[in-house]
Image (cartoon, rainbow, N blue to C red):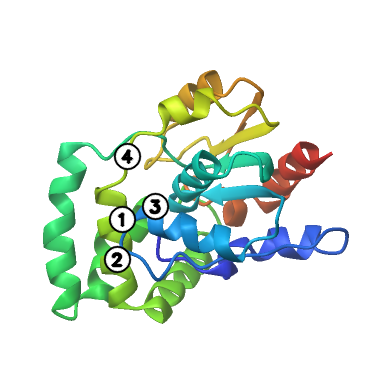
Amino acid sequence: MMCDARLFTPVIERLSSTRPIMCFPLTGSHSIQGLAETVLRHAPPSFVLAGLSMGGIVAMEMIKKAPTRIERLALLDTNCSAENADKAATRAPQIEAVKAGGLWAVMRDEMKPNYLTDGPERGRILDLCMQMAMDLGPDVFVAQSESLRDREDYAQTLTQVNVPSLVLCGEDDELCSVAKHETMHELLPNSTLTVVPNAGHLVVLEQPDAACDALLKWLS
């Protein structure tokens, strides 16, 4: 949520010399279904698919809609469940605050501090996250918040996925726990679970070497 292609800079730098990479913005719709349809409309006829956090949720909707087009699936620091009532209740005041001009404060005080574990790169990565959020702006925040609030449960969808799949998360992810990833691994018939130490919710920025190693193994 509120990240752009800069989230995947380490992955692009390491993998793009040997394979084409496309990054899609999660904008232009107020629903997970609409976002998935937009990406599918612009994606190649067949492809491998990786999504992190909200991107992972969109990826689950994509493979539900177009299972024959997706050759491999990677779900990173994400959650296959519908939004719970407690979390949903926090969305309305955040949306109202952002509409009133408070995007910076909401991102700084309520969201971004939960993304990362402690480490020497925490400040730099938080600065990047804030820059991405402010560049995307309040309208994207509202649309993405509503999409996440109204999403469906994808547990049953995962049981039908037969392609080689990677489930990966940071060991210290406070937003999408290791237990949630263990559940997704159990649901996916042909999956590998990788838990990366010293990383929180944005494993591709916090521990890029470990994340890229896992992605390369998944692709091989």
Q: Sequence order check: which comes first, mark 2 or mark 4? A: 2
Instruction: Please state which amino acid type lies under the numbered disc 3.
Output: Gln
Q: Residue at x 79, y 63 (%)?
A: 20
Which residue is label 2 attached to? Answer: 143
Name the quadrant of the N terminus.
Answer: bottom left
Picture disc at residue 33: 3
Proximity of marks 3 and 1: CB atoms separated by less than 8 Å: no
Disc 1: CA contacts within 10 A as few (<14), some (14-19) or many (>=20): many
Front residue of 96 and 147 = 147
Label 4 sits on a secondary structure element that is loop
Which residue is label 4 attached to? Answer: 152
Q: Residue at x 49, y 63 (%)?
A: 38
Q: Sequence order check: which comes first, mark 1 or mark 4? A: 1
Label 2 sits on a secondary structure element that is helix
Proximity of marks 1 and 2: CB atoms separated by less than 8 Å: yes
Front residue of 135 and 207 = 135
Disc 4: CA contacts within 10 A as few (<14), some (14-19) or many (>=20): some
CA distance separating discs 3 and 4: 9 Å
Disc 3: CA contacts within 10 A as few (<14), some (14-19) or many (>=20): some
Q: Residue at x 44, y 77 (%)?
A: 131
CA distance separating discs 1 and 2: 6 Å
Which residue is label 1 attached to? Answer: 147
Q: Residue at x 39, y 71 (%)?
A: 28
Instruction: Please state which amino acid type lies under the numbered disc 1.
Output: Ser
Instruction: Please state which amino acid type lies under the numbered disc 2.
Output: Ala
Task: Where is residue 217? Give x, y as percent.
Answer: 79, 37
Front residue of 47 and 168 = 47
Q: Sequence order check: which comes first, mark 3 or mark 2? A: 3
Label 3 sits on a secondary structure element that is helix
